[in-house]
Amino acid sequence: MAIDREIVEEAAAKLKAISGFNVLSSTVNKEPYIIINGTKFRLAYVKEVTKALKDVIIHLIQTEIADKKNPFILITKYIPNDVGQQYSKENRINYLDLNGNCYIRTDTFVILITGQRREKIEKTNQSRAFQEAGIKIIFWLLNNPEQINATYRIIAKKSGVSLASVGYVLQELTALNFFMKTQKGNFLKNKKELLNRWVLAYHDVLRQRLLLKKMRFTKNDKKEWSRLPVQDTQGTVLWGGEPAGSILTRYLSPMVFTLYTDSSWKTLIHDLDLAPSENGEIEVLKIFWIEEENDKNNLTAPPLIVYADLMGSGNDRNIETANKILENELSYIQ
């Protein structure tokens, strides 16, 4: 996950001041790192750890550092105390936030600092790459690798964002070592890392904004979910999440149901015989990608969306299903 170098320096300075340990940080290299009492740590970065994201972060971090020899630390602006306890006691994930809260274990020392209050930080010069417009642009680039050399105007049109946003986002992706423009054409770099960062941003920033309604089946036909006539509805309706994972891999029996639509949720009352329900097992979300890319012959949302839905669930079976999609439909991102 792309490192915020300023956060690394501030967090390292805070840790040194509170702990009394010898802490050095280096952010000038391609891969920033921290040295604590002579031990070098690789870094993983998440803007902020929330309860909603804590499980997906675990899986993404474990995947990211699985093949790396040096110990690592998760750097973040803030981590809630209960999440920090889970990471330290259950997952043994080293972490450090901007306030000095941390759990860092090595063979020679352990640092555990909790209870540091969250400081108010003015939101200035925020990265656009992983805000709403950036999330839509990155999705389009990852979902359409054959169009990597498209003009800014086409990218803007296909992503549903402003032309100016494309320029800003690609500039930041270049600075973050995710995008490169050469005489031979454009290239996405570190695609797996970009995918991981996009999944986090999708859940953290965009997905909740897409939620239209919670609904339920009216005929207790959960087991017959695949018979719902989603292709015969007004507009476009596509399965996401667990149902889409089941369709793509034949590996999952859905318990939570996700539908994406470009129409009103009210049309699903008549078209699919669903009913609104605050505690319903069906979540209905608005399609954010351009409608012309949808095909009435499709049953599922794009594999990128399905992968993100499953990774965000925190369910082990869903994570396994997401990895199968990554190995097959999304193998070009490896």
Image (cartoon, rainbow, N blue to C red):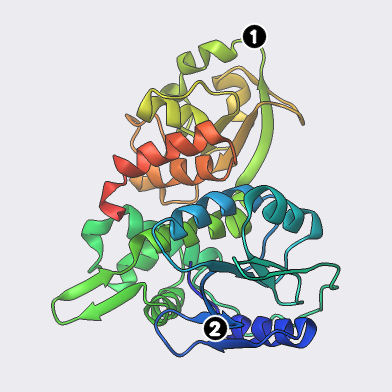
- Specify the farthest residue to the front: 108
Quarter placement of the C terminus: bottom left
Which circle marks residue 219 in the picture? 1
Residue at image position (31%, 66%) is: 154
Q: CA distance from mark 2 to mark 1?
A: 54 Å
Q: Are marks 2 and 1 in contact (CB under 8 Å)?
A: no
- Give the percent coordinates (x, y) of residue 251: 41, 24
Instruction: For residue 294, say whether it is visible.
Output: no
- Give the percent coordinates (x, y) of residue 281: 66, 26
Secondary element at image label 1: loop
Which circle marks residue 125 in the picture? none
Q: Earlier in the sequence, mark 2 or mark 1?
A: 2
State the image quarter where residue 5 is shown: bottom right
- Give the percent coordinates (x, y) of residue 59: 53, 49
Instruction: For residue 202, say whether it is visible.
Output: yes
Does residue 197 lie above or below 27 as drawn?
A: above
Residue at image position (59%, 15%) is: 222
Which residue type carries mark 1?
Lys
Which circle marks residue 5 in the picture? 2
Residue closer to the observer: 79 or 162: 79
Residue closer to the observer: 173 or 62: 62
The number of numbered badges drawn on the structure is 2
Does residue 212 lie above or below 277 as drawn?
A: below
Does residue 269 lie above or below 260 as drawn?
A: above
State the image quarter where residue 124 is shown: bottom right
Residue at image position (59%, 88%) is: 24
